[in-house]
């Protein structure tokens, strides 16, 4: 990893809701010097105790990933923020890319995300990873499970996360725009749990349906009911 000193300028914001099973692996992959804010939405499975025991700063409030991310950002004091899901593990190469991005004096006006990896050996996972890479390359649209690295000035300039229960990642990227985003080397390894539960076709189809509905102006609250059904 290069430029580890730059990570002292970074705070990782992790939204949680009953994430005790996945959060330890996410935290264990963090390099020294990184400050962590866990923004909880009412966990009842011991997540708050786990986060505090790991030395994380802890904030809590109503559930809803958009407002949890927003609360975490409001608690952050360092120049850079990495918004990261509680079931996502950043690779060593990813941390190196993050450190280099932060250390580059030209990048505060440029947000970044990592390359998606799914923790399953199925061929369907590789297909989804390639499709996501194409989506990011051609549409400039990473999802939240790829992480979002952003300087506090750029975050403030675009107005930060909205208080949405779902689609908060799509919404903020719409305001950020592809010209203010870059893809980094290194992976964000995310859990395949939702694909295993709904099936590779079922979960992927649901994701695309939710995106289409959001782009058509359907309120995020209605989309959430569909997603959680």
Image (tube, grey):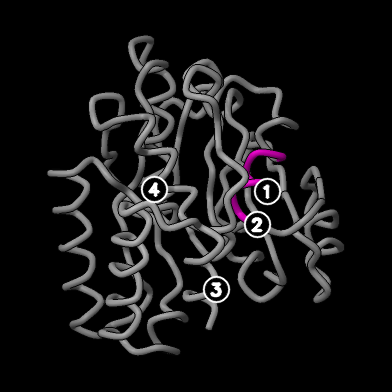
Q: Which numbered disc flags the more N-terminal residue, 4 or 2?
A: 2
Q: Name the residue tied to disc 1.
A: 68
What quarter of the picture does the N terminus occupy? top left
Distance CA(mark 1)–CA(mark 3): 18 Å
Q: Quadrant of residue 57?
A: top right
Q: From the viewer's perspective, is 50 left or right of 104?
A: right
Residue corresponding to mark 3: 225
The answer to whether residue 5 shows anywhere in this view is no
Side of 89 where 163 appears, left or right: right
**CB under 8 Å between callouts 3 and 2?**
no
Q: Describe the element under mark 1 as helix, strand or loop.
A: helix
Residue 199 within the segment the image draws in magenta: no
Q: Give the residue at x 42% y 58%.
A: 218
Q: Please tell me whether mark 1 or mark 3 is closer to you in this view.
A: 3
Decide: is 122 above or below 118.
below
Secondary structure of the residue carrying tag 4 is helix
Residue 111 horizontal/vertical position (percent): 38, 29
């Amino acid at each position: 990893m290069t430029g580890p000193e730059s990570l002292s300028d970074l705070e990782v914001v992790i939204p949680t809701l009953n994430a005790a099973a996945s959060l330890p692996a996410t935290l264990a992959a963090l390099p020294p010097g990184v400050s962590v804010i866990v923004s909880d939405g009412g966990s009842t499975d011991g997540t708050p105790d786990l986060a505090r025991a790991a030395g994380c700063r802890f904030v809590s409030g109503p559930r809803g990933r958009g407002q949890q991310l927003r609360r975490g950002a409001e608690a952050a004091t360092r120049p850079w923020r990495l918004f990261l899901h509680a079931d996502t593990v950043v690779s060593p190469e990813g941390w190196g890319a993050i450190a280099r991005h932060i250390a580059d004096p030209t990048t505060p006006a440029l947000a970044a995300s990592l390359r998606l990896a799914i923790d399953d050996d199925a061929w369907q996972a590789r297909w989804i990873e390639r499709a996501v890479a194409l989506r990011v390359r051609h549409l400039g649209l990473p999802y939240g499970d790829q992480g979002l690295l952003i300087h506090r000035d750029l975050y403030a300039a675009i107005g930060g996360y909205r208080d949405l229960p779902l689609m908060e990642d799509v919404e903020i990227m719409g305001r950020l725009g592809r010209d203010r985003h870059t893809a980094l080397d290194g992976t964000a390894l995310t859990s395949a749990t939702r694909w295993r539960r709904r099936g590779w076709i079922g979960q992927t189809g649901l994701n695309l349906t939710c995106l289409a509905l959001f782009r058509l102006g359907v309120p995020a609250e209605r989309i959430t009911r569909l997603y959680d059904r």
